[in-house]
Image: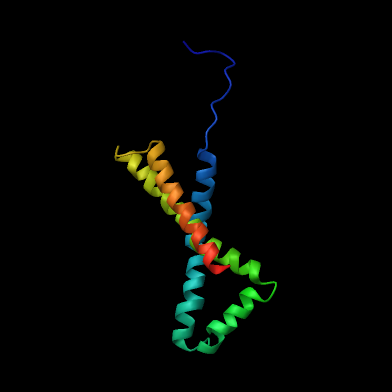
């Protein structure tokens, strides 16, 4: 029997879907721009290798106000796509009836969180 006026069940799915969506946008917009700027333009000679040297990038990221932009860049290029992939894997396991429960949720999203924190720690 269905109860009337029952409180709605709380779910954590909106958080994971938001991270999935943000990661998908980053895959579609930010990652191709990063590949263009960091791989293709230097190979074509449009950007000199000196402009992407370690001392110059290190100075830009660590000794200026742009340091927060560096963390945002790493977050948008590495962390958000990790959560996008984790969400796809979690729901793929659910669709294949190989998981989809709490264990796969903890493994998928937990590994994305740990790798994201490691990436942010290494850049800071």
Spot occupied by residue 106 in the image (x, y as percentages of width and height)? 43, 43
The quadrant the C terminus occupies is bottom right
Give the residue displayed 38% in from the left and 36% down from the top: 101
* Most distant residue in the right direction: 65
Tell me where residue 99 sits by quadrant.
top left
Labels in figure, total: 0
Spot occupied by residue 119 in the image (x, y as percentages of width and height)? 50, 63
In the depicted structure, whether residue 25 falls above or below residue 94: below
Q: How is the image coloured?
A: rainbow
**Is residue 87 shown to the viewer in this render?**
no
In the depicted structure, whether residue 33 falls above or below residue 92: below
Tell me where residue 96 sits by quadrant.
top left
Give the residue displayed 46% in from the left and 10% down from the top: 1
Give the residue displayed 48% in from the left and 84% down from the top: 42
The front one of 58 and 43 is: 58
In the depicted structure, whether residue 98 falls above or below residue 49: above
Give the residue displayed 63% in from the left and 74% down from the top: 62
In the depicted structure, whether residue 57 falls above or below residue 2: below
Spot occupied by residue 18 in the image (x, y as percentages of width and height)? 54, 47
The front one of 59 and 28 is: 59
Spot occupied by residue 48 in the image (x, y as percentages of width and height)? 52, 89
**Is residue 8 shown to the viewer in this render?**
yes
């Amino acid at each position: 029997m269905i109860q009337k006026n029952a409180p709605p069940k709380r779910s954590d799915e909106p958080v994971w879907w938001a991270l999935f969506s943000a990661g998908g946008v980053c895959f579609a917009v930010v990652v191709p721009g990063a590949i263009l700027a960091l791989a293709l333009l230097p190979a074509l000679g449009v950007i000199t290798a000196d402009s992407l040297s370690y001392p110059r990038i290190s100075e830009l990221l660590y000794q200026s106000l742009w340091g927060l932009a560096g963390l945002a860049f790493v977050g948008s290029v590495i962390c958000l796509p990790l959560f996008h992939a984790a969400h796809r894997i979690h729901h793929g396991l659910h669709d294949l009836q190989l998981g989809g429960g709490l264990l796969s949720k903890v493994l998928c999203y937990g590994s994305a969180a740990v790798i994201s924190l490691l990436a942010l720690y290494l850049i800071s």
